[in-house]
Amino acid sequence: MHDIYNFVVGPLAWFGWGVFILGSIFKLVYAYNKFVTKDGTSAPYMSWKYGLRSIGAWLVPFNALGWRNNPLVTVVTFVFHICLILVPVFLSAHAVLWQQFFGVEFFWTLPDNVADYMTLAVIAACVFFAVRRLAYPRVRFVTEAKDWWVLLLVVSPFITGFLAYHQVFQYQIMIVLHVITGLAWLALIPFSRLAHMLFILFSRAYIGSEFGGVRKAKDW
């Protein structure tokens, strides 16, 4: 099991990071070329002012009409995304790996007990999203099989990480599963619906530029 662990945090980890970085570059370049060739008339209307204004407006909970229409979904969405980003990056155990493999040393990490609660928040949010997909006809109608796979992919590293930290079941198996599921999540970001992590700022800036520069209106 020790050899397997060394493999997943070594060669497999570099492979996962490579797929993520190269895949992200490919998808961003591809999307930019599509934008220029298929929607070139919109390019002159792209505006830093209106783009950043839209991004800032949608980053504030309940500022946009879309956020105010469903307060519970808004709260869960914000908590989910904040925890989803902060825990993998600033977990103290991960900080050791950042320094070991990338030479990056953080001046601050999440306290373990806080990270534990944030992990539970991500798991609870995923349960909420799953129940919502089953319970609400409109959401169920647009749900496809790949949505369930993405939800499972996102929650798996958090479940296995939580079980490994609390040493539920066999620790060595759980930590290997945690690394494998985390790498799968990372590598599939550019090639799944998780790609919105790469494009959300551009999409928001595009819409904000159109509303601000063309329609002379707000998009929130």
Image (cartoon, rainbow, N blue to C red):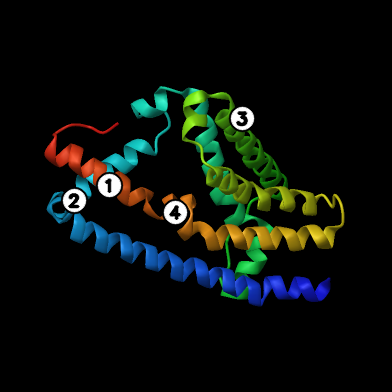
Q: Which numbered disc, 3 or 1, marks the residue that appears first in the sequence?
A: 3
Q: Is residue 169 left or right of residue 94?
A: right
Q: Which numbered disc, 1 or 4, marks the residue that appears first in the sequence?
A: 4
Q: Which residue is mark 2?
A: 46
Q: Residue 30 appears at what percent x and percent y?
A: 32, 64
**Disc 1 from disc 4: Cα separation:** 16 Å
Q: Residue at x 33, y 36 (%)?
A: 57
Q: Does residue 108 show up? A: no
Which class describes the residues within 10 Å of circle 2: few (<14), some (14-19), or many (20+)? some
Q: Which numbered disc, 1 or 2, marks the residue that appears first in the sequence?
A: 2
Quadrant placement of the N terminus = bottom right
Q: Residue 37 appears at what percent x and percent y?
A: 19, 61
Which class describes the residues within 10 Å of circle 4: few (<14), some (14-19), or many (20+)? some
Q: Which residue is mark 1?
A: 205
Amino acid found under the numbered disc labelled 2: Met
Q: Secondary structure at mark 4?
A: helix
Q: Nearer the viewer, mark 1 or mark 4?
A: 4
Q: Are marks 3 and 2 in contact (CB under 8 Å)?
A: no
Residue 11 found in image quarter: bottom right
Q: Are marks 1 and 2 in contact (CB under 8 Å)?
A: yes
Figure disc tally:
4
Q: Residue at x 52, y 30 (%)?
A: 140
Q: Which residue is mark 3?
A: 131
**Disc 3 from disc 1: Cα separation:** 31 Å
Q: Is residue 168 above or below residue 137?
A: below
Q: Residue at x 33, y 41 (%)?
A: 56
Amino acid found under the numbered disc labelled 4: Ala
Q: Secondary structure at mark 3?
A: helix
Q: Which numbered disc, 3 or 2, marks the residue that appears first in the sequence?
A: 2
Which class describes the residues within 10 Å of circle 3: few (<14), some (14-19), or many (20+)? few
Q: Is residue 180 above or below residue 220?
A: below
Q: Secondary structure at mark 1?
A: helix
